[in-house]
Image (cartoon, rainbow, N blue to C red):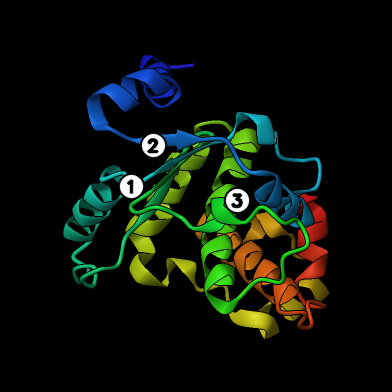
């Protein structure tokens, strides 16, 4: 591990320092969030290591900087960003999923949107647990080269085409993987067809 890697790891895992210096609110995943995440990640994500930081300015500042460097339009007013560093998911505002205590809750449209945002960021935590800190630089490289299109995996038809040709989830860039997982979970929550997504989700879970 390089010196830079150790610095990052110490920074994001020192929860007390983050709270003291930046006022981040930190918590573990709730029972409901774990239940929903397991629909995607199964036993392949160490849920106990995940920390959720809410209302943090860090992801918004990094997004502003990234957009400036990549010459992308500014983020819309009121829209907040999220970023995952290692096992730590930082959200630019508070999530609402931790208020769900009934494991059998039928999610509303708004709750699905909140939970799917979390699922996307948990995909990056899974990538970290699988790849180490390499995932961060790989994601940054793809974002720099592709800009806003970095999330476009080609939709359901491209999933079918990729699967038919023997392609794997690893053939998609890390943000595309996040969108595939996010939209699979959304479809599951809405009880919609997930056939095109399932071969790739099985490679994760």
Tag 3 residue: 123
Tag 1 residue: 55
Callout 1 touching callout 2 (CB < 8 Å): yes
Callout 2 touching callout 3 (CB < 8 Å): no
In the rendered structure, which disc, 1 or 3, sits on the residue that comes first in sequence? 1
- The one of 196 and 106 positioned closer to us in this rendering: 106
x, y percent for residue 1:
49, 16
x, y percent for residue 41:
74, 49
Asked whether the viewer can see residue 162, the reply is no
- The one of 138 and 114 positioned closer to us in this rendering: 114
Q: Is residue 47 left or right of residue 57?
A: right
Query: Which element is circle 2 on?
Result: strand
Residue located at (23% from left, 25% from top): 21
x, y percent for residue 204:
76, 51
- The one of 114 and 121 positioned closer to us in this rendering: 114
Which quarter of the picture shows residue 85? Answer: top left
Query: Which element is circle 1 on?
Result: loop
x, y percent for residue 187:
70, 76
Residue located at (25% from left, 68% from top): 78
Which quarter of the picture shows residue 146? Answer: bottom left
Cα–Cα span, label 1 and label 2: 7 Å
Tag 2 residue: 25
């Amino acid at each position: 591990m390089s010196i830079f890697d150790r610095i990052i790891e110490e920074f994001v895992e020192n929860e007390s320092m983050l709270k003291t210096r930046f006022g981040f609110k930190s918590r573990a995943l709730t029972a409901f969030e774990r239940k929903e995440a397991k629909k995607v990640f199964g036993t392949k994500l160490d849920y106990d290591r995940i920390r959720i930081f809410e209302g943090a300015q860090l992801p918004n500042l990094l997004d502003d900087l990234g957009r400036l460097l990549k010459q992308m339009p500014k983020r819309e007013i009121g829209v907040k960003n999220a970023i995952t560093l290692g096992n730590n998911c930082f959200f630019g505002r508070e999530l609402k999923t931790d208020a769900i205590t009934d494991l059998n809750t039928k999610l509303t449209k708004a709750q699905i949107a909140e939970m799917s945002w979390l699922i996307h960021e948990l995909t990056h935590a899974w990538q970290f647990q699988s790849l180490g800190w390499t995932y961060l630089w790989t994601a940054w490289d793809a974002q720099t080269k592709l800009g806003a299109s970095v999330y476009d995996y080609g939709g359901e038809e491209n999933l079918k085409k990729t699967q038919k040709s023997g392609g794997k989830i690893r053939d998609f860039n890390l943000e595309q993987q996040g969108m595939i997982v996010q939209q699979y979970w959304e479809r599951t929550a809405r009880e919609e067809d997930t056939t095109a997504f399932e071969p790739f989700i099985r490679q994760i879970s």
